Image (tube, rainbow, N blue to C red):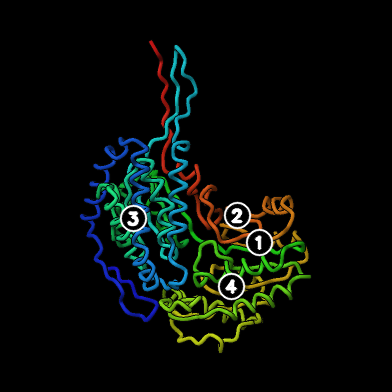
Amino acid sequence: MIRCVSPIDGSAYAERETLAPDQGKAAVVRAKVAQPAWAARPLAERIALVQAGVARVGEMNDDIVPELAHQMGRPIRYGGEFGGFNERATYMARIADDAMADITVEDSEHFRRVIKRVPHGVVLVVAPWNYPYMTAINTVAPALIAGNTVMLKHASQTPLVGERMAQAFHDAGLPADVFQNVFLDHQTTSDLIAAKSFGFVNFTGSVSGGQAIEQAAAGTFTGIGLELGGKDPGYVCDDADLDAAVDTLIDGAMFNSGQCCCGIERIYVAEQHFDAFVAKAIEIVNGYVLGNPLDPETTLGPMAHVRFADAVRAQTAEAIAAGATAHIDPARFPQDGGAYLMPQILTNVSHDMRVMREESFGPVVGIMPVKDDAEAIRLMNDSPYGLTASVWTNDVARAEAIGDQIETGTVFMNRADYLDPGLCWTGCKDTGRGGGLSIIGYHNLTRPKSYHLKKA
């Protein structure tokens, strides 16, 4: 049984029974049987059906927003995820013709030589709870457009999301077996992967979860895409627009209660701007309202689960015990010791502290002064993760030169915490492997097939 415990009040918000192993196998068989006919449909038809499904999700948004608050705690004032959900799906639909186009090497009187892109077959999408619609659509939309059938296994904290998406796409006309929402326990999921059930598996989640996926797929030659989190840095150079940097980096650290894969978790500031940056950051955070996410006045909701909040509390307490300075007064943010967690800004931190090295995934950020670009680059690279990095400067060449030296998947200049669907969403080190969205996303969700045709 999958149970979603609402972070709002600790009540059981939704329960769903997982599929038995034989039911999971039957779902795979249905997806495999449905896939050839789906892939045989014209590309334009697949695109239209996916776009119709996306639009149907938008029509459900008034119901989806409070559901998200109940499931994972995001305040209703932010209106859900449909903007980004639609942006990503629409972009992938728009580039599909070019991304899937044949590569003709020769078409002469003697030979036709061409490389085509063909679907893997069945794609398993294992999606996380923190941005449950946007992270899922990153793979669901291009996988379906490319001619794959899709099985979506959503996080246990957000079980209604997969149901909503499946309902929307089926209402729009996608056959039920082409896009299935499934509830699977970890063992059944691993067993299905080990049995070569899928042509491709995309997982977004923890490092340990990614390792379990890799272990299950070992020896099967199943394609895998893994996005496993980060410890994303921001660097404020000496020539940065300080106000813009503070506003964006602190929002990137605290929005969604810090529960974002590409959220800002550590900040390095040119030493001459350090005091001013910290003062402005404190002012911003002191203006937040921690409370029930169903209240329109709330700007900071609870974390998705008590255990997530406890992990951040432990990191923060350890840092303070080791000499870090906490700048946010707990009296401003009454808490109950549960999922509701106050935001915190820490200085006098070092990379000896877990809060500056291990993923926090919560509303805490450490800020350090640096003397120059070299020191900032060294500190930004001193991490087992590599998802995004945010550089603040008025010099594009400088930002690109710094970016060339950072071990990361994406380099931002003067922005942060954004996923551009035109660029490959990827990471390095413990952040994972593969890449989603952009033309590269289509390449990962298909395989090349070569035709060498000798004419009579």
Between marks 2 and 3, how big is the CA–CA gap?
A: 36 Å
Distance of mark 1 from mark 4, alpha carbons? 14 Å
- Report if the CB atoms under discs 2 and 3 are less than 8 Å apart: no
Q: Secondary structure at mark 2?
A: loop
Of the residues under marks 4 and 2, which one precedes in the sequence? Answer: 4
Helix, strand or loop under label 4: helix
Q: Which residue is mark 3?
A: 56
Q: Report how far apart the C-alphas of labels 4 and 3 lie in the structure.
A: 41 Å
Q: Which of pointers 4 and 3 lies earlier in the amino acid sequence?
A: 3
Residue 195 locus on image (x, y percent): 30, 48
The amino acid sitting under disc 2 is: Thr
Q: Amino acid at mark 1?
A: Met
| Mark 2 nearby-residue class (10 Å; few <14, some 14–19, many ≥20) | many
Q: Do labels 4 and 2 touch, CB within 8 Å?
A: no
Crowding at dot 3, Cα within 10 Å, few <14 / some 14-19 / many 20+, comes out as some
Q: What residue sits right under mark 2 in the picture? A: 408
Residue 398, given in percent of the width and then of the height, sits at 74, 53
Q: Nearer the viewer, mark 4 or mark 3?
A: 3
Residue type for callout 4 = Val
The residue lying at 35 percent from left, 47 percent from top is: 50
Question: Quadrant location of residue 448?
Answer: top left
Which comes before the other along the chain, label 2 or label 1? 1
Task: Tell me, yes or no, whether the two marked residues, 2 and 1, touch with CB atoms within 8 Å.
Answer: yes
